[in-house]
Amino acid sequence: MEREKVITTDRLTKRFGDFTAVDAISFEVEKGEIFGFLGANGAGKTTAIRMLCGLSIPTDGKATVAGFDVYRQTEQIKRSIGYMSQKFSLYEDLTVRENIRFYAGIYGKSNRFIKDKTERLLLQLHLQEEANKLVKSLPLGWKQKLAFSVAIFHEPEIVFLDEPTGGVDPVTRREFWNMIYEAAEAGITIFVTTHYMDEAEYCNRVSIMVDGRIDALDTPRNLKQQFEASTMDEVFLKLARKATRAGE
Amino acid sequence: MRTLLFLLQKEFRQIFRDKAILRIIFAIPMIQLIILPQAADYEMKNIRLSVIDHDRSEYSRKLVQKVTASGYFLLNSYTASYTEAMHEVEEDRADLILEIPARFERTLVRENEAMLYMSINAINGVKANLGGAYLRTIIQDYNQEIRLKWLQQPRFSPETRIEVTPTNWYNPLMHYKNFMVPGILVILVTMVGSFLSSLNIVREKEVGTMEQINVTPIRKHLFILGKLIPFWILGLVVLTTGLIISWALYGITPVGSFFTIYVFAAVYLLALMGLGLIVSTYADSQQQAMLISFFLMMVFVLLSGLYTSIESMPKWAHYITYLNPVAYFIEVIRLVVLKGAGLHEIRQQLLIMLGFAVVLNTWAVLSYQKRS
């Protein structure tokens, strides 16, 4: 059965002067899929994500996100996606509750919706006690889980996670991935970059970027077969060693 | 519209939660208003004088008495020789040397003419200038007294004399503070209006929340408005507290209306925030924003007419002041506070300020869109 495509790119390219950061990448992501977007530092992942989020206009090629064109319909795209970057992006000088309220509010959610969902979310994250504490007082793992919850609070079609688990302990990472699975089951498409290869194993499909191009794209199992490797780590190393570009 | 309310709610929460910012906004301006006008004074007092009196006569003693009685001079020392007096100057204990030659009284009485020598330490030009002028005036006065005493004035003086009696309008007692306090108030409003707002935006860039905001559907101009409105209000609050302090502490109340001041301040703050925004779009870190702001502030203050009058600047500097929003506000606030100017009298400055507001904000919004 053909599933709905929420992201399609066709020879999507971004050049900065002479430098081609993203070199004609083409792929599709299906609804509800957990799509791993891998690559060494400097491979062009962040540039690609920025184009898909409507933050940066491509130089060439085509792409749609949630059915909207990345050249002309960036506002509609922004309305349909959630985003969580490697840099922590909640306001540290606001409380947990205020952060949720602010981000939900600017997506145009009603007060009723915000109020109900905030209570459910606090319960779910076991943050009822901390609801009125400043975010900066929370441990990093909790912050990241909260940031993810805030990124999908407005119920987007797709959520982009740019190295969401950097610096987080293994237990919290596991919990974080449980949250990702829950979101995917709820129909939210997950587009995630990571440097942890065990996390790559959790993805439905994985693409690996080398020097601005996508060199491999398949399920983790098929990739391991294709590259005669026992782990994703080996697959990644085999591909990444070919890279000529220096890391960022 | 609802988005803007969420933005404003967030901004005000952050501002009122940050104790350091609150202190900068309120305490520092107040301290400046309390201390600066008392300390920074144009009038030269306490000019240190060394006297070499070779004559030691009644006349020379009277002269020295008259000089010290004027209140401008502090008699630092009586020295026996010029070399000694010069030594005092070199050691920075004296600013001025007055040398009264031997036989000062005798030549004065006999020949109706006597010479005095004055040496001035001119490292501080203003002090030297004023000190020299004060001393000359006192000596002339002394001269006049002697003349009156000696001459039986004829019914019509053989010498034509023109005497000028000045009237000081708008600041009758030439109170230095009446002139300075409104100016300092302008500087305070300027700091809150432009630099705090630019620092605030740059901080969001630095922390990374800016990127998060950029992926939300918030429109750029709404986000900017959400940043400007709180600081616009804060600027007016600082102006109000400042006006209260200048009334309570210095008894300065505007001769003109508060309404005129607020109308101009409202437009002025808009213009300045445009400037702050421009700084924030070009700066990537708070440090950069601080440095740019500091540089701009220095130029603005020095070329604003706060301390030195614009009219006496060289032509080229004069032209620069046309581009300095601070200069307009200082001019306007002095006109309103001291002279009682109304909206009609300041319409030209108001229109220019509106022009500044439009140009700077357009520039800011354009460069903001390009850079993010």
Image (cartoon, coloured by chain):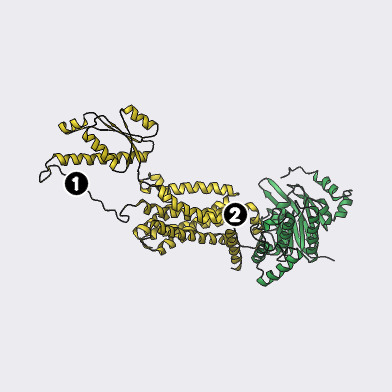
Cα separation between marks 1 and 2: 68 Å
Residue indicated by mark 1: B162
**Callout 1: helix, strand or loop?**
loop
Badge 2: few (under 14), some or many (20 or more) residues near its Cα, within 10 Å?
few
Q: Residue at x 69, y 58 (%)?
A: A53
Please, what is the three-letter code of the amino acid marked with disc 1? Answer: Ile
Q: Residue at x 14, y 39 (%)?
A: B150
From the viewer's perspective, tell me whether residue B38 is left or right of residue B66.
Answer: right
From the viewer's perspective, tell me whether residue B89 is left or right of residue A218.
Answer: left
Hue used for the chain lettered B: yellow
* Chain to which mark 1 belongs: B
Badge 1: few (under 14), some or many (20 or more) residues near its Cα, within 10 Å?
few
- Looking at marks 1 and 2 on the same chain, the residue that comes earlier in the sequence is marked by 1
Quarter-of-image position of residue B224: bottom right
Between residue B364 and residue B14, name the one nearer to us.
Answer: B14
**Residue A99: % across, % down:** 66, 62
Asked if residue A217 can be seen in this view, the reply is: no
Hue used for the chain lettered A: green
Q: Quadrant of the N terminus of chain A?
A: bottom right
**Residue A85: % across, % down:** 71, 55
Asked if residue B243 can be seen in this view, the reply is: yes
Residue indicated by mark 2: B370
From the viewer's perspective, tell me whether residue B272 is left or right of residue A241.
Answer: left
Badge 1 and badge 2 both on one subunit? yes
**Residue at the farthest left position:** B155
Tell me the tag on residue A224: none
Between residue B44 and residue B337, name the one nearer to us.
Answer: B44
